[in-house]
Amino acid sequence: MTKPNLFLVYVTDVDRATAFYRDLFAMEPAMVTPRYVPFEVAPGVLFALWSGRADQLDPATPRTSEVGLMLPGTAEAVDQLHQDWVARGVAVVEEPHDEVFGRTFVVADPDGNLIRVSPLD
C-alpha cells in the first residue's frame, strides 16, 4: 500500500525559508534548487519547501494546516524548546499550554506557515 512521503510547504522566498528551517530544525537540505528544497526527515520521507506558486501565496490568508514536531520527554522539554525558539526570535502564535495530547505551542515561519510542537505520541 502507498503512504504519503512528500510534505510541501509553500513559501514566497525559498532561500529565506531554507535558512529558517535549516536553523530551526538543525538539518541540512537533501538538495537545493531555485524553487524547491527538500529535507529528508526519515528514510524516503521528504519535507520540502516550494516557491513555485509564490505569486499565489497571500500571507494574510489564515493557515489551516500545521507542520508537527513531536518531542520525546516531558512537558518541560516542550517548554524549554519554546524558550530556545523565542530567544532566537521565532514568531509565537500560541504560547505553551496543555491540550488533550499534552503540552504544546505553535510558532510561524516567515510566510505564516504554522509549526506545532507537542510531546511524542
Image (cartoon, rainbow, N blue to C red):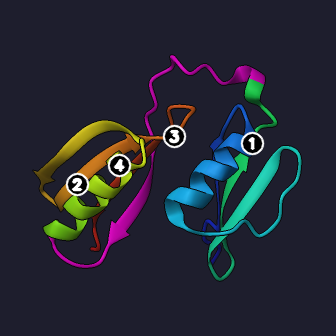
Q: Which residue is mark 2?
A: 104
Q: Which residue is mark 4?
A: 87
User: Which secondary structure lies at badge 3?
Assistant: loop
Residue 109 x/y as whole percent: 51, 40
- Mark 3: amino acid: Asp
Residue at image x 57%, y 32%? 111
Q: Which residue is mark 3?
A: 109
Q: Quadrant of the N terminus?
A: bottom right
Q: Which numbered disc flags the more N-terminal residue, 1 or 2? A: 1
Q: Nearer the viewer, residue 100 or 14?
A: 14
Q: Please provide the residue range marked out in magenta.
A: 55-74
Q: Nearer the viewer, mark 1 or mark 4?
A: 4
Q: Which numbered disc flags the more N-terminal residue, 4 or 3? A: 4
> From the viewer's perspective, is residue 89 above or below residue 18?
above
CA gap, disc 3 and disc 1: 12 Å
Residue at image x 21%, y 42%? 95
CA gap, disc 4 and disc 3: 15 Å
Q: Based on the displayed image, in which of its 4 quarters is residue 50 positioned? A: top right
Q: Nearer the viewer, mark 2 or mark 4?
A: 4
CA gap, disc 2 and disc 4: 18 Å
- Mark 1: amino acid: Val
Residue 13 x/y as whole percent: 73, 35
User: Which secondary structure lies at badge 1?
Assistant: helix
Q: Nearer the viewer, mark 4 or mark 3?
A: 4
Query: What is the number of the mark on residue 14?
Result: 1
**Left or right: where 14 falls relative to 71:** right
Residue at image x 28%, y 54%? 82
